[in-house]
Image (spheres, grey):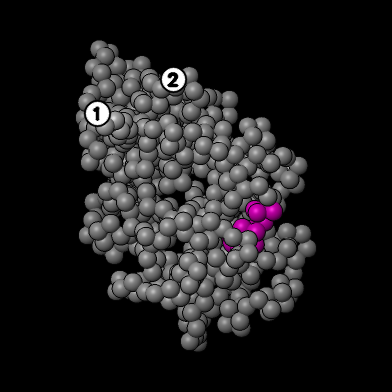
Amino acid sequence: MTAVPTRPARVRPRAPRGLPDLLAHRAAAEPERTAMVCGPRTLTFGAWHARAEALAAGLRSRGLAPGARVVLRYGGGDWTEYAVAYCGVLRAGCVAVPLSDRQAPAVAAHVLADSGASAVLHGPGGGMPEGVLPEGLWEATAEETEAGSAPHPGPGPEPDPAALAQILYTSGTTGTPKGVTATHANLVHGCTLDERRRPLRHSRHFLHAFPVGTNAGQTMLVNALDSAATAVVAPQFTPGRFARLIEEHAVGSVFLVPAMAIELLGSDAARRRSTDSVRLVGSTAAALPQPVALGLTRAFPGAQVVNYYTSTEAAPAQITLLFDPDRPDSPGRPASVSELRITTPEGTPLPPGEPGEVWLRTPAAPRTYLGDPEGGAGVFQGRWVRMGDLGRLDEEGYLHLLDRERDVVKSGAYKVSTLQVENALHAHPAVADAAAFGVPHPVLGSVVAAVVVPRGELTVPALRTFLLDRLASHELPARLLFRPTLPRNEGGKILKRELRLLLDDEALR
């Protein structure tokens, strides 16, 4: 009898233990490959790894033990330096606390105190604002820290995957930012050491303009470490520059937030650039208004428009919503619904078609609030994370986001979705941007108000007439105000509390 040859079992490569482990692997495999481009600066995997190792050693020589919190204060033009500092801090076993240099001094002071920071690393442009750095904390650039390890103690042992790695502060649209903690295992979940399985293989380059200190920015940092494409970072978002970078680098994947999409679609300079290379347009941080999503499909006809639904608390849990131009009433159909559920306020799952609270299940070690695990009981339940949104899944599996739970306007006997009002406002060709929210009313409790950024000639009566065909009477804004811009935080989310103050100021005039 002839023996049948057996095929050897395929050995799946081990998963990386943390982001420093992933960086070491990429550096060993392709040391000269460019990992990141930001303005005139480039960073190869080999240089990234070598500098991160030296910085980790420098942190140890300055007396920082594993678990020490290090605030990383960097600007949009410092992404290559930030990438080195971040991976160096994690390699030393310390905890990275990302912070944009555009945050107000009061926010910086809160982050330093709340995180229990031991040190600050910053970009070449300077450190903390005067008077913010407490006595006893030191600050330095990444280069100064790399050069300061004498005698050289080495970077130390590789950190435990279960150890704390990052404290990322929420955007704080409604109050004081909260620190959200993540372990090394949480941050590296889904990453691979198998070169054949790298994401974004359709792209030679991917592009973003997200600031340091946001969940979207951290996702892009992980993409730079894990994906097949080179990261291109726009130091500051302007539609003309963003479109120029798409053309210059033949970018295949573009990542933005709705505010950037609105500016990009309204820019003549952007429309003059070639964007034929783009195959993926990903939006995150907030729901894309329906007219904006449709505009992106026209501006990038060869691309799939995707809404990435996640949060700082839920990551790495993420629902990928593939936008369908034939179903613009939904941000898209989830690629998988196994990690998503719609529930009653008590947590009971609801059937398709029923509106309720949106929850995501994280596949990795869940995150929690710094120093306040009990305070997060209403947000974290095992591996499930409450998103703070109201939504429903229809019979065909499309997700419909109805509103942020806190933004629903209870007007008399009705509940009004501000997302629906904003979609109607964005449908007007002379509306560049818009935000809807509730304001107090002596009889109805609340009514809808809206602040609009007009494009060209637009009057309040003309806009009200336009809305009559699109909104019910209780959904129509009782107050409409035109302004040149809308206030947004670093992550691109509209600060509706500031808009309410704006309306209060108008009423006093």
* Between 389 and 491, the one nearer to me in the picture: 389
* Above or below: residue 140 compared with residue 408: above
Residue 153 percent across, percent down from the top left? 23, 17
Residue 508 appearing in the image: no
Q: Along the horizontal axis of the image, is 81 left or right of 169? A: right
Name the residue at the front extreme: 1
Q: Along the horizontal axis of the image, is 45 left or right of 330? A: left
* Between 213 and 386, the one nearer to me in the picture: 386
Residue 203 appearing in the image: yes
Task: List the residue tagged with mark 2.
Answer: 31
Q: Along the horizontal axis of the image, is 419 left or right of 158? A: right
Name the residue at the right extreme: 457
* Between 374 and 290, the one nearer to me in the picture: 290
Q: Quadrant of the N terminus?
A: top left
* Above or below: residue 258 compared with residue 347: above
Amino acid type, callout 1: Glu
The residue segment tinted magenta is: 288-298
Say the numbered circle drawn on residue 158. Answer: 1
| Residue located 53% across and 61% down the image | 332
Q: Along the horizontal axis of the image, is 152 left or right of 209? A: left
Q: Count every numbered label the image shows and give the total.
A: 2
| Residue located 51% across and 25% down the image | 34
Q: Quadrant of the C terminus?
A: bottom right
Q: Element under label 1?
A: loop
* Above or below: residue 449 compared with residue 315: below
| Residue located 65% across and 68% down the image | 425
